[in-house]
Image (spheres, helix red, strand yellow):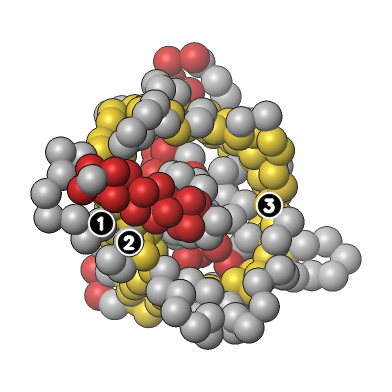
Amino acid sequence: MKKLLAVLLLTIVFFATQQAYAAFDDTYWGVRALGMGGAFTAVSNDANAPLYNVAGTAFAAQKEATLMGSRLFAGLDGVEIASNYAGYVHPISAQYGAISFAWSSISTPGLRREDTFSVGYARVLNDILRLNSEIVELSAGANLKYLMQEVKFDVSETDLNTYEGAMTGDIAVLAMFTNGIGLGFSSKYIVPADIGFMEKDEVKNTNVLGLSYYSDELPLVKIPYFTAALDVIFRDSETFIRAGVESYVLDRKLAIRLGGREEAFNMGFGYEFAFANETKLVVDYALEIPFEVEDSYGSHFFSLSFKF
């Protein structure tokens, strides 16, 4: 009887939380990326890159660590969903590339939690492929990931596990052309990862194509340090679109971002504080307004990033 009750409770918890977000759907992390609607695959060049395109870590100019906290769907009675992220990128050298570490988590306290731990490596391939750096810089990278899903239920005696975990990985490439165009591709969860409790439940392979354009000053309208980005996501026979823009003003200290996807509008800003020895502190905020969730005043994301 207790085992049957555990199964029923687990099923209720699973389907209730699945309505809020899909299993290991990379959506709610990286404040800079979220301000751009999540379109970041062909932009990735900071500590958010391990989530979107690990190949982009090869373009990080400095060592960088970032910490993010959030509150999702604020204002909904009885709904408590939070996402957290910590990432670190360590450029070694042009010859040896960069390594990265990341942890992301999304949870409903007392119900369900997803955690992803990743270790990544990326390198610019121009010397190996004999590409002209005056035309393009091409990088490739890979992530090794451990996925863990935990469900909590009030049953003291049961032989069901409260968490399940599995290993998987990502592979990615990023081409940055000197004319400002960027092309990125990231294939996530390339190895089947079964995180099911009672039956097989594999995390779906997700492929993302990214396109970006950067200009120090956008022609005609003269918007400074302007980036536009588009991501097309293919997951389990479905296609999703994300798009966003970013501009830096005030001597590249203040970032302004806008973006969106099918179900939400995004906006955000960031400010960079510069210190001695090229050390920098970046404060970022993003707001996501869902189109179809009533009584919510949006999801709020805040991060601190250190470049050194």
The earlier-in-sequence mark between 2 and 1 is: 2
Relative image position of residue 107 (x, y in whole percent): 35, 61
> Which residue bears the numbered disc 2?
111
The earlier-in-sequence mark between 2 and 3 is: 2
> Is 132 or 143 nearer to us in this picture?
143
Relative image position of residue 177 (x, y in whole percent): 64, 37
Residue in the picture at 69% in, 44% down = 240
For the question of whether residue 63 can be seen, the reply is no
Q: Which amino acid lies under the numbered mark 2 shown in the image of this protein?
A: Leu
Circle count: 3
Relative image position of residue 144 (x, y in whole percent): 30, 31
Where is residue 140, by image quadrant? top left
Marks 1 and 2: in contact by CB < 8 Å? Answer: yes
300 horizontally vs 123: left or right = right
Q: CA distance from mark 2 to mark 3?
A: 29 Å
> Which residue bears the numbered disc 1?
152
The earlier-in-sequence mark between 1 and 3 is: 1
Q: Residue furthest left?
A: 157
Q: Which amino acid lies under the numbered mark 3 shown in the image of this protein?
A: Arg
Marks 3 and 2: in contact by CB < 8 Å? Answer: no
Q: CA distance from mark 1 to mark 3?
A: 33 Å
The residue carrying pointer 1 sits among few (fewer than 14), some (14 to 19) or many (20 or more) residues within 10 Å by Cα, namely some
> Which residue bears the numbered disc 3?
242
Q: Is residue 181 above or below residue 192?
A: below
